[in-house]
Amino acid sequence: MSSLPTSRPRPGAQSIGRAMGLVNLVARHHDLGISLQALVQASGLDRTTAWRMLGSLLLAGWNGITRVSNDQVTTAR
């Protein structure tokens, strides 16, 4: 089941919608973290796209993510 919006996003907002879908998935799994593979499966995004979006959120200072690795995305507690 995808947590990403099913309605058509406004032009130019597709990336924001996808990133927020990842944020919501990470937030729902904050207690134990979530694997990149699980994020990819739940979001329907390509692995590389999800990886880059998570890395961008981390670099931008979003404090919901504390670490992104190939195996696990961990969050602040």
Image: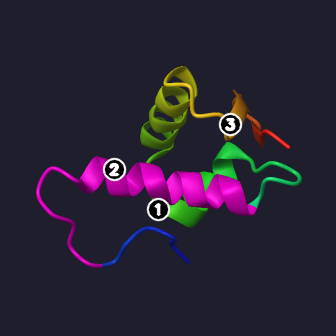
Does residue 13 show up magenta in the picture?
yes
Which residue type carries mark 1?
Gly
Q: Is residue 63 visible?
A: yes
Q: Report how far apart the C-alphas of labels 2 and 3 lie in the structure.
A: 17 Å
Q: Dot 3, crowdedness within 10 Å: few (<14), some or many (≥20)? A: many
Give percent across and percent down for residue 58.
58, 28
Which residue is label 1 attached to?
Answer: 44
Based on the displayed image, in which of its 4 quarters is residue 74 positioned? top right
Pick whichever of labels 2 and 1 is earlier in the sequence.
2
Which residue type carries mark 2?
Ile
Give percent across and percent down for residue 1.
56, 78
Which residue type carries mark 3?
Ile
Pick whichever of labels 2 and 3 is earlier in the sequence.
2
Which residue is label 2 attached to?
Answer: 16
* Residues rendered magenta in the picture: 7-28
Does residue 23 show up magenta in the picture?
yes
Verify CB contact (< 8 Å) between mark 2 and mark 1. Answer: no
Q: Report how far apart the C-alphas of labels 2 and 1 lie in the structure.
A: 15 Å
- In what element is the residue under mark 3? strand
